[in-house]
């Protein structure tokens, strides 16, 4: 008795939308971003907000227009638009039918086993985990955008050339042996690089998991806080001693890179009036060129698992981002 691969083909076809969403939107960093679905190519980002200096902003580039001719009023209005673009991405994965059949026979067909999901769901879930890792890495580490992949956040932020662009500091987070004072100095440098109105909001500092571990060890060594043995996840985001509005958050896409990226977290209702997150993840999972498909390639004797979708990144406020390396 062999596993009928046609059942996997039919399952993927029928669950296309859910499979694409699971493969793309479950990447480690995306819950901390604002997600825009249904972007086919490029869309303008129009955003209007009054800041603490009585300035009306349409993010991010500034074209001042006086609302008050008095030089002491300090009132200006800023008109601008940012654009978020998505790039078509196609992923091919070859699956060995013999391996699939062996797993099916050994793990799903034994009597007495109580499986809560179907074997088809198991295969899809395992493939989605691999896709999540791939997309997570690309989110942060991709270089300039091409026709094959979108631009990553680190490259986008570092190449920001607007007069109100992101600020940088020199501090490599992937350095074992730093003291708590050195780490807090690194956090302070990023915090100080943000404008005053952003410093008053809740902020999130993204680092890799090893970097997060180094930070925590330094804090515990300095007795800033103690290890809690009841903590379910050693990599839960945690606040920074002395800067209670800064949460340091580990993400897989920054593992071992030494980068730290700080921006507004979106947990404040006064940021844009609705608590929006600064970084935007745009995607298209339902367009005419998106697909999830499994086909048997006879001359290779393999199953080809194809996913086709679009995604891209942007942010509202470049000057609400600081980074270090």
Image: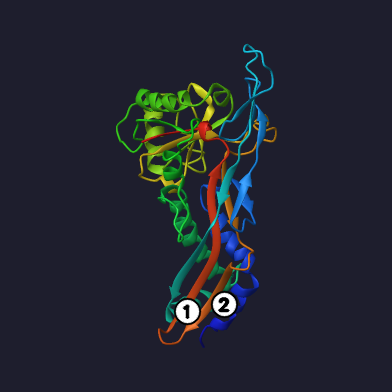
* Of residues 190 and 211, the one drawn nearer to the viewer in this rendering: 190
Q: Which quadrant of the view contains residue 39?
A: bottom right
- The residues tagged by marks 1 and 2 sit, at their Cα atoms, a distance apart of 10 Å
Q: Determine if residue 313 is in view.
A: yes
Residue at image coords 43%, 78%:
96
Please state the total of marks drawn on the protein image.
Answer: 2
Against 220, residue 14 (above or below) is below
Against 10, residue 242 (above or below) is above
Query: From the viewer's perspective, is the residue at label 1 or at label 2 nearer?
Result: 1
Question: Tag 2: Cα neighbours inside 10 Å, few (<14), some, or many (≥20)?
Answer: some
Q: Position of residue 72 (x, y in %)?
A: 63, 11
| Image quadrant occupied by the C terminus | top left
Residue at image coords 42%, 51%:
142
* Of residues 76 and 86, the one drawn nearer to the viewer in this rendering: 76
Q: Position of residue 164 (x, y in %)?
A: 50, 30
Residue at the extreme front of the image, as rendered:
69
Q: Which residue is mark 2?
A: 8
Residue at image coords 48%, 21%:
242
Q: Secondary structure at mark 2?
A: helix
Q: Position of residue 221 (x, y in %)?
A: 36, 27
* Left or right of 171 on screen, residue 238: right
Of the two numbered discs 1 and 2 on the same chain, state the one appearing first in sequence: 2
Q: Secondary structure at mark 1?
A: strand
Q: Which residue is mark 1?
A: 303
* Of residues 181 and 111, the one drawn nearer to the viewer in this rendering: 181
Residue at image coords 41%, 42%:
208
- Is disc 1 in contact with disc 2, using a CB cutoff of under 8 Å? yes
Mark number, residue 62? none
Question: Tag 1: Cα neighbours inside 10 Å, few (<14), some, or many (≥20)?
Answer: some
């Amino acid at each position: 008795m062999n596993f009928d691969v046609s059942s996997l083909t039919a399952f993927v076809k029928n669950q296309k939308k859910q499979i694409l969403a699971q493969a793309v939107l479950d990447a480690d960093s995306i819950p901390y971003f604002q997600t825009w679905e249904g972007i086919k190519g490029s869309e303008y980002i129009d955003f209007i907000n009054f800041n603490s200096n009585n300035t009306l902003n349409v993010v991010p580039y500034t074209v001042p227009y006086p609302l008050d001719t008095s030089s002491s009023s300090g009132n200006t209005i800023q008109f601008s638009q940012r654009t978020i673009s998505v790039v078509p991405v196609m992923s091919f994965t070859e699956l060995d039918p013999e391996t699939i059949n062996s797993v099916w026979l050994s793990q799903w067909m034994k009597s007495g086993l109580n499986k809560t999901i179907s074997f088809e769901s198991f295969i899809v879930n395992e493939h989605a985990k691999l896709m999540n890792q791939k997309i997570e890495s690309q989110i942060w580490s991709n270089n300039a955008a091409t026709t094959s992949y979108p631009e990553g956040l680190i490259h986008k932020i570092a190449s920001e050339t607007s007069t109100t662009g992101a600020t940088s500091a020199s501090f490599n987070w992937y350095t074992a042996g730093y003291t708590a004072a050195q780490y807090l100095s690194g956090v302070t440098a990023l915090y100080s690089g943000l404008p005053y109105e952003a410093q008053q909001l809740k902020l999130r500092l993204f680092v890799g998991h090893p970097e997060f571990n180094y930070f925590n060890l330094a804090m515990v060594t300095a007795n800033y806080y103690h290890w809690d043995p009841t903590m379910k996840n050693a990599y839960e985001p945690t606040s920074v001693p002395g800067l209670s509005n800064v949460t340091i958050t580990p993400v897989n896409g920054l593992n071992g890179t030494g980068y730290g990226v700080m921006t507004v977290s979106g947990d404040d209702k006064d940021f844009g009036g609705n608590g929006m997150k600064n970084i935007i993840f745009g995607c298209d999972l339902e367009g005419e060129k998106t697909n999830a498909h499994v086909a048997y390639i006879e001359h290779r004797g393999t199953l080809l698992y194809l996913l086709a979708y679009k995604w891209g990144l942007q942010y509202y406020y470049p000057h609400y981002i600081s980074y270090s390396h």
